[in-house]
Image (cartoon, rainbow, N blue to C red):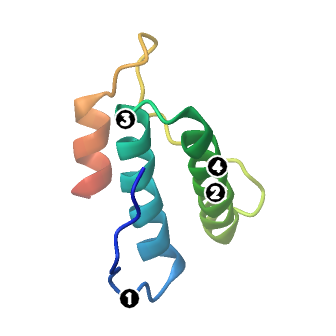
Amino acid sequence: MAQEATMDRITDDYELAAVVAVRLRDARAAGDIEHSRRLAAALHALTERFVHEVDPAGTTAALLPHMNEQLDPVAVARLLNP
């Protein structure tokens, strides 16, 4: 998979998480399993940090997926438009 020659400046962990998430989606779409694994691990580590920043006890969980593993559009809308 070719790397982009230029990259926008990433100024914080939130922007980094967004870039990693997009690259992960692209790697999975391209069938690049090894790169997908590395990106998924990095994204997991970043999001774990975010969770512990706002919920150190780990008592709050995002319940966005349904049991069928599809996203719940109502829960997503409520999350993005409080």
Q: Secondary structure at mark 2?
A: helix
Q: Nearer the viewer, residue 79 or 28?
A: 28
**Labelled pair 2, 4 in contact (Cβ < 8 Å):** yes
Cα gap from disc 2 to disc 3, whole angstroms: 18 Å
Could you tell which of marks 1 and 2 lies nearer the N-terminus?
1
Residue 25 image position (x, y, % from top left): 38, 43
- Which label's residue is closer to the chain start, 3 or 1? 1
Comes first in the chain, label 4 or label 1 = 1
Mark earlier in primary sequence (4, 3): 3
Marks 4/1 in contact by CB < 8 Å: the verdict is no
Q: Position of residue 46 (x, y in %)?
A: 62, 63
- Mark 2 or mark 3: whose residue is earlier in sequence: 3
Q: Is residue 60 left or right of residue 21?
A: right
Q: Position of residue 48 (x, y in %)?
A: 67, 57
Q: Which residue is mark 3?
A: 30
Residue 4 image-quadrant placement = bottom left
In the image, residue 3 sits, relative to residue 24, either above or below, namely below
- Which residue type does callout 3 highlight? Ala
The residue that label 4 is drawn on is: 38
Q: Residues within 10 Å of mark 4 (few under 14, many from 20)?
A: few
Q: Nearer the viewer, residue 39 or 14?
A: 39
How far apart are the two marked residues, 4 and 1, measured between alpha carbons? Answer: 21 Å
Mark 3: secondary structure? loop
* Residue shown at 49% from the left, 36% from the top: 32
Q: Which residue is mark 1?
A: 9
Instruction: Name the residue type under label 2.
Output: Ala
What is the secondary structure assignment of the residue under circle 4?
helix
Q: In the rendered view, would you say 62 is above or below 66?
A: below
Residue type indicated by callout 4: Arg
- Crowding at mark 1 (Cα within 10 Å: few <14, some 14-19, many 20+): few
Looking at the rendered structure, the kind of residue marked 1 is Arg
